[in-house]
């Protein structure tokens, strides 16, 4: 029988990363766009880095898990073009999830700033302090931040479209078990072609 749900570990990694990315994005946006007192701005940048670096460790666990456990079978009736677009979207999302914190790490390294991980320890610099390169890495980091925001919004919109328009169970396959609708025998019978 085909698996219709992601594993508990995949769900935990997915939702933990989603929360970390959203919180890091908000903290980064807040600290880089608002005129704040120096102490508050410094604290918000450190908070941004502390959260963002966690995604690297989560990604180091998530990618091998995804490669070895795969995804549940796709719902019947999903057009092949839509399946292909979903694969491309997921690939771009994974690339951004890796490139975004790495570009921030390079930016901080080039600028000579330390990079905290959850406030517990610091990452080593990826390069010697090179102030001339810091603005380049900063710009790359900003572009990637907006790219991941667009990809995450697209991901959410497609999940909602599948759920509300297509009546697909693909959204439920990633939801924690307590949020998944329980289907009794009568509903299953109604859904079956022979019913």
Image: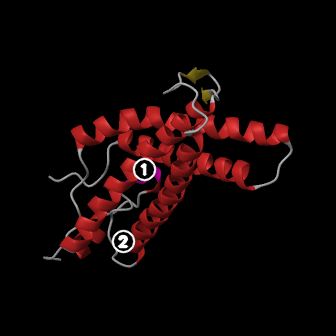
* 169 horizontally vs 154: left or right: left
**Residue 8 in picture, x, y percent from top left:** 37, 41
The disc placed on residue 71 is: none
Q: Which mark is residue 162?
A: 2
Residue visible at 22% across and 38% down in the picture: 68
Q: Is residue 176 magenta?
A: yes
**Which residue, given by chain and number where applicable, does mark 1 sit on?**
96
* Nearer to us in this view, 50 or 9: 50
Tag in front: 2 or 1:
1
| Number of residues whose C-alpha sits closer than 10 Å to that of mark 2, classed few (under 14), some (14–19) or many (20 or more) | some
Of residues 162 and 112, the one drawn nearer to the viewer in this rendering: 112
Which circle's residue, 2 or 1, is located before the other in the chain?
1
Instruction: Between residue 184 and residue 17, name the one nearer to us.
Output: 17
Q: Position of residue 60 (x, y in %)?
A: 38, 33
Dot 1 alpha-carbon crowd within 10 angstroms: few under 14, some 14 to 19, many 20 or more: some
Whether residue 95 appears in magenta in the rendering, the answer is: no
Q: Secondary structure at mark 2?
A: helix
Query: Which residue occupies 34% across, 61% down?
Result: 89
Is the residue 165 above or below the residue 97 in the image?
A: below
Q: At which x and y percent is residue 102?
A: 47, 38
The boundaries of the magenta stretch are: 173-178
Q: Is residue 169 visible?
A: yes
Quadrant where the C terminus sits is bottom left
């Amino acid at each position: 029988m085909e698996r219709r749900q992601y594993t508990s570990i995949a769900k935990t990694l997915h939702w933990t990363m989603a929360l970390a990315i959203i919180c890091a994005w908000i903290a980064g946006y807040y600290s880089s766009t608002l005129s704040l007192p120096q102490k508050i701005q410094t604290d918000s940048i450190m908070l941004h880095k502390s959260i963002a670096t966690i995604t690297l460790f989560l990604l180091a666990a998530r990618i091998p898990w995804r490669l070895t456990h795969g995804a549940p079978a796709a719902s019947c009736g999903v057009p092949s073009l839509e399946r292909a677009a979903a694969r491309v979207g997921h690939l771009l999302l994974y690339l951004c999830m890796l490139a975004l914190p790495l570009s921030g790490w390079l930016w901080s390294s080039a600028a000579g700033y330390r990079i905290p991980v959850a406030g517990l320890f610091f990452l080593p610099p990826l390069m010697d302090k090179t102030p001339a390169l810091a603005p380049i890495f900063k710009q790359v980091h900003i572009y990637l931040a907006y790219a991941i925001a667009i990809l995450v919004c697209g991901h959410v919109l497609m999940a909602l479209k599948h759920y509300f328009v297509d009546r697909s169970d693909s959204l439920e396959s990633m939801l924690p078990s307590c949020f998944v609708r329980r289907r009794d025998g009568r509903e299953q019978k109604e859904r079956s072609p022979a019913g």
